[in-house]
Image: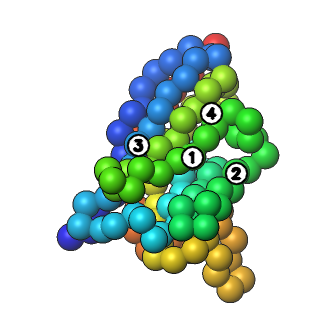
Amino acid sequence: QVQLVETGGGSVQAGGSLRLSCKGSEYTLTSSCVSWFRRVLAKEREGIAAIYAPRGNTYYVDSVKGRFTISQDNAKNTVWLQMDSLKPEDTAMYYCAADPGPCAWAYTRWNETKGYKYWGQGTQVTVSS
């Protein structure tokens, strides 16, 4: 059974850092588009970063550019999200998502949930002011 397992969430003060990890089980992340989404309360999930390692492609939304870095370790079958200079508005449940192939689909952007077949259960990030 395919699983994506997120770890690394927690509570931190504004300006601090956290590193989230997404590890694939029964699924190889190497040739997949792997993304991080987040959701605040009842709002829809927001795609914030993605990576397609075979082409060295990374994608970020403006709100996290320069603060968050997505990377991949194929040997560990893990994708990381390094989050620096955290702000209270970064507080959310963070989810990992993956889909085979590049981060490019007809009529679907990389930061849309419908592009992804596999999802993790999420890890909570709380940033206090």
Residue in the picture at 54% in, 52% down: 36
User: In the rendered view, does 28 fall on the left or right side of 95?
Assistant: left
- Closer to the camera in the image, 39 or 101: 101
* Mark 4 lies on residue: 90
Chain-order first, disc 1 or disc 4: 1
In percent of width and height, residue 89 lies at: 67, 31
Chain-order first, disc 2 or disc 1: 2
Q: Contact (CB < 8 A) between labels 3 and 4?
A: no
Of badges 4 and 2, nearer the viewer stands 2
Measure the C-alpha gap from mark 3 to mark 4: 17 Å
In percent of width and height, residue 107 lies at: 71, 83
Q: Amino acid at mark 1?
A: Ile
Measure the C-alpha gap from mark 4 to mark 2: 14 Å
Secondary element at image label 2: strand
* Mark 2 lies on residue: 60
Residue in the picture at 73% in, 50% down: 61
Of badges 3 and 4, nearer the viewer stands 3
Q: Residue furthest right?
A: 62
Chain-order first, disc 4 or disc 2: 2
Q: What crowding class fits label 4: few (fewer than 14 Cα within 10 Å), some (14-19), or many (20 or more)?
A: many
* Mark 3 lies on residue: 21
* Mark 1 lies on residue: 70
- Closer to the camera in the image, 29 or 111: 29
User: In the rendered view, does 1 fall on the left or right side of 95?
Assistant: left
Query: What label sits on residue 38 in the rendered view?
Result: none
Of badges 1 and 4, nearer the viewer stands 1
Q: What crowding class fits label 3: few (fewer than 14 Cα within 10 Å), some (14-19), or many (20 or more)?
A: many
